[in-house]
Image (cartoon, helix red, strand yellow):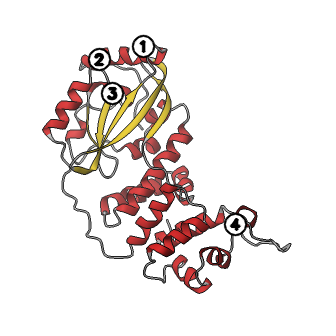
Amino acid sequence: MDRTSPLGAFLKARRARLSPDDVGLPRYGDRRRVPGLRREEVALLAGVSAGYYTRLEQGRQANASPEVLDALARALHLSPAERDHLYDLSSTTGHRPAVSGDDEKVSADLRTLLTTMAAHVPALVIGRRNDVLAWNRTGHVLLAPHLDFAAPDDPGGRPNLSRLVFLDAPTRALHRDWPAKARAVVGNLRILTARNPGDTHLAALIAELTARSAEFRSMWDAHTVAPCGRDVHTLAHPAVGELTVTQQTFDVPKEPHQSLVTFTAEPGSPSTAALEALKTRGRTVDAPVACAPTP
């Protein structure tokens, strides 16, 4: 876990990945004790004092203005997603209300949509901490046939996608490129924690993954930012073999902390045929699916 503030840790990680050559600064033949830019070099590029930047990175500066944040984003060559993350981290130094531990609920209309989509598209709804709040039969049999279909209905035992990727053996085996999937999960968790600093349940999830997975700890320390959107995954499914799916994530209207996640395949491809086979299994509630046991 970070010893400095989240903002300071992010700034430090981002300057560590840049060299003077990357930003057009001279080296003067110096030998650097640490990789990346020095604090005073970032301050120079951003047009702020070295002392001010040092206080920001050490967590001793209460906040930064939008102008300073924009200057830091330019100096550190941040992507649009990283710039947004920088803003989220800066705002955490204020006092946001703590996130309630109240049960997250899926509306009846959204459940109807999930059920209707099951004939064509595997889908699920996830909440503010990547908990599965609901899924259709096809989404369940695609991603987690070894789990109880009704598991999302129990607020205390809902599957969590982040936990599954790092701690669940069948989920790990499902993803051909597990490291890429794991990095994406961590990058999304970075965004969630910055946007919800008062969420004790989310903090507990991060603590659990940090304690139980050395791979998670390593990826978490990299401070990668990766918003959910569109991604392509190759899956090794225990029932239908290998298939490639496009995962897309959509915000749910009027439910700012919920997202609809869908999975599709290229029309006419072998992956589409595999999805069709899974849809048939999904329509049979008790269809057996051979897979490794959970740890």
**Could you tell me which residue is drawn at 52 percent across and 57 percent down?**
220
The amino acid sitting under disc 3 is: Pro
Left/right of residue 99 with respect to residue 79 in the rendered view = left
Residue 36 circle label: 4
What residue is pinned by disc 1?
Answer: 273
What residue is pinned by disc 2?
Answer: 287
**Could you tell me which residue is drawn at 40 percent across and 63 percent down?**
194
Question: How many residues crowd around disc 2 within 10 Å: few (fewer than 14), some, or many (20 or more)?
Answer: few
Question: Which callout, 1 or 2, points to the residue nearer the camera?
Answer: 1
Eyeballing the image, is 144 above or below 82? Answer: above
Residue 122 circle label: 3
Give the mark nearest the N terminus, 2 or 4: 4
Left/right of residue 176 with respect to residue 262 in the rendered view = right
Give the mark nearest the N terminus, 3 or 2: 3
Eyeballing the image, is 58 above or below 206? Answer: below
**Outermost residue, right side:** 29
The amino acid sitting under disc 2 is: Ala
Question: How many residues crowd around disc 1 within 10 Å: few (fewer than 14), some, or many (20 or more)?
Answer: some
Give the mark nearest the N terminus, 4 or 3: 4
The quarter holding residue 192 reads bottom left
